[in-house]
Amino acid sequence: MSTITIKDVARLCGVGVSTVSRAINNHPDINEETKSKIMEVIKENNYIPNNSARNLKRSNSRTIAVLIKGISNPFFSKMIKILDREIQSKKYSFLLHRVDDKEDEIDVALELIKEKRLRGIVFLGGFFTHSKEKLAQLDVPFVLSTVGMAQQWSKDVCSFVAVDDFKESYKMVDYLCKLGHRKIAIITTSLDDASIGIIRYNGYLQALKDNGIEPEDALIRCMKESIETYTMENGYVVTKELLESKEEFTAIFAISDIIAIGSCKAILDAGKSIPNDYAVAGFDGLDYASYYNPSITTIRQPVEEIAEATIKILFDVIRKKSDHQLRVFPAELVVGQSTKQI
Amino acid sequence: MSTITIKDVARLCGVGVSTVSRAINNHPDINEETKSKIMEVIKENNYIPNNSARNLKRSNSRTIAVLIKGISNPFFSKMIKILDREIQSKKYSFLLHRVDDKEDEIDVALELIKEKRLRGIVFLGGFFTHSKEKLAQLDVPFVLSTVGMAQQWSKDVCSFVAVDDFKESYKMVDYLCKLGHRKIAIITTSLDDASIGIIRYNGYLQALKDNGIEPEDALIRCMKESIETYTMENGYVVTKELLESKEEFTAIFAISDIIAIGSCKAILDAGKSIPNDYAVAGFDGLDYASYYNPSITTIRQPVEEIAEATIKILFDVIRKKSDHQLRVFPAELVVGQSTKQI
DNA sequence: TTGTAGGCGTTATCAG
DNA sequence: CTGATAACGCCTACAA
């Protein structure tokens, strides 16, 4: 079992290594007979080519990597499936790589490019605060997909596709206002560091403002740092605290469905009713939102379209059909049972 | 940016490649001054070592791979986090690799072993039907964690940790019987192919039998093949069909919480009440189950303990402290609001 | 402490 | 159609 190599196979077959190589790589110029004989020996001896050696030697690889930050986010599950499907359909292979919260996705990408000779990269999730210069190090086509960004980049920097978090967040809060809510709480990320939470928070502020409502600090709640963020538990705890504070409010806007579910549970556990006592709204459009009881009013991101556009753009760039493209998809406000006119 | 190598760095620094190598690998025998100078040049030029070349040369690598089948299963999210933490704490690096449903996890592992010089492997999820011979090809320590298995292997074959799906499933159904239910529907996987669903289904059958209840074909429902399995949607559709069939029943046992949530929604949408009209029970112990409204009675798998035991056993085997170990954890029946005495 | 050279397992080039 | 042989980029004796 001690690691059999291509040389061993060659020796076993009484041929040269290059012939074996041709056999395993489906090269055209090889005798069918020798090829099948080689394949047989390979099967018998469980020979498996070493990918490191292959990658080292090869200059191209037909593989697209998807680097994903926050892999446990259920929002990405469907996304990954579609990306996978699309990539495979182009006869490329799909490499999913999770990026730790603390890691720098560009560095990870740089490493992977060298290691795997990537042809393209998709960045999923996270929040980009990288400089143009840093981004410029990536000498492989890439697309940012549903990643938050601090500044609005222009098309000469890179391609990206996502929804407009500010606008969609605004849309939701504005909707709540139009339903008659004046005291709308928000549950968001810590406002200290750059994140998608800030953008959605800004949409919230703007919507309040445009509806002539003064934001109240007491209604602006952040997820607990001590608990894992973006979890139902966090939403639950924060909402419970809010309820117990006796602060007056009639609606909660949670910046993610996961949090919204925690909020709902906290409200229900407190013996209150949704939407009669409190309205709850989420963001993302996860299955969980629509299957919850009551179903949760949310902003549904068009996952399918986002994923497809991501791959389309990526391949356009790979094939030099086009330069960078920016695509912002509109998201849909899905009205559930968790909100109502008051 | 055209791929700078260790040679370039060496030339740039006016030193030999081995000196550079020593610098980047923190070797002790190198002058601090030359080292820092080298590191500086490396930074300036954004040099990144090629992992393929490294892996090719190295014989060991201190990396543990976790191969996971069904990566979108939220049950694994927490699992992954703990595995990651545990592996890092042992100063090993953690490689998460998703295995497609159609792929053979052993083959994938074999490839990865060669490519990355793995020191250990954790298989997560899926259902093993491999032969001993196939398993024997793995010349690297590995542990099966929460993977279903057709036969009961003995300890000489491999290590594994999981809950006893038969027993736990039995426990749940028996509990429903004790609550007074006699007509208990089950939603499971297709009964054709080997899977964890079959085992849980068998537990269901046995529990019915021991409670003197004759199973009814009409109450045995399988997830739709046409819809992605293990989704709320699937649970919803199947339950809706069941309700519309006018078949008489008082409880539903779904073999996963995800399905149970779909079931609940279907029941609620039909204007029925849980648990007054129908009781619903799930399996897994996901957050969703307890945050749902009503909270769902389920079997909670001790994720934390399973993950920790997995790593412990793996390292025991790696360090030759022990031979294969089998650990079966008891799961907990968590009573929610979705069931009650009738 | 540092440099040189050989080899890790493949693939690709170029003669045969 | 097939077989040497030179890279691919790095690490590691071994020598200096």
Image: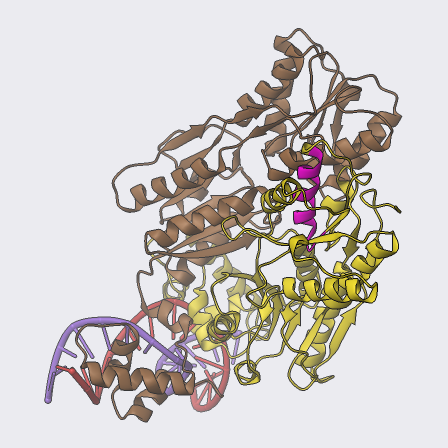
Chain colours: A yellow, B brown, C red, D purple
Q: Residue A273: where, in percent of width, then height?
A: 77, 35
Q: Quadrant of the rendered structure where residue B279 is?
A: top right
Q: Residue B41: where, in percent of width, then height?
A: 35, 87
Prevailing secondary structure of the magenta residues: helix
Q: Residue at x 51, y 79 (%)?
A: A59
Residue A255 lies in the magenta-colored region: yes
Judging depth in this view, the residue of B294 and B179 nearest the camera is B294
Q: Residue B161: where, in percent of width, then height?
A: 44, 35
Judging depth in this view, the residue of A328 and B209 nearest the camera is A328
* Side of B161 relative to B184 (left or right): left
The answer to whether one can see residue A35 in this image is yes
The answer to whether one can see residue A16 in this image is no
Q: Residue at x 60, y 34 (%)?
A: B195
Residue B93 lies in the magenta-colored region: no
Q: Quadrant of the rendered structure where residue A122 is?
A: bottom right
Q: How many marks?
A: 0
Q: Residue B121: where, in percent of width, then height?
A: 41, 49
- The residue range painted magenta reads A253-268
**A135, above or below A244, in the image:** below
Q: Quadrant of the rendered structure where residue A153 is?
A: bottom right
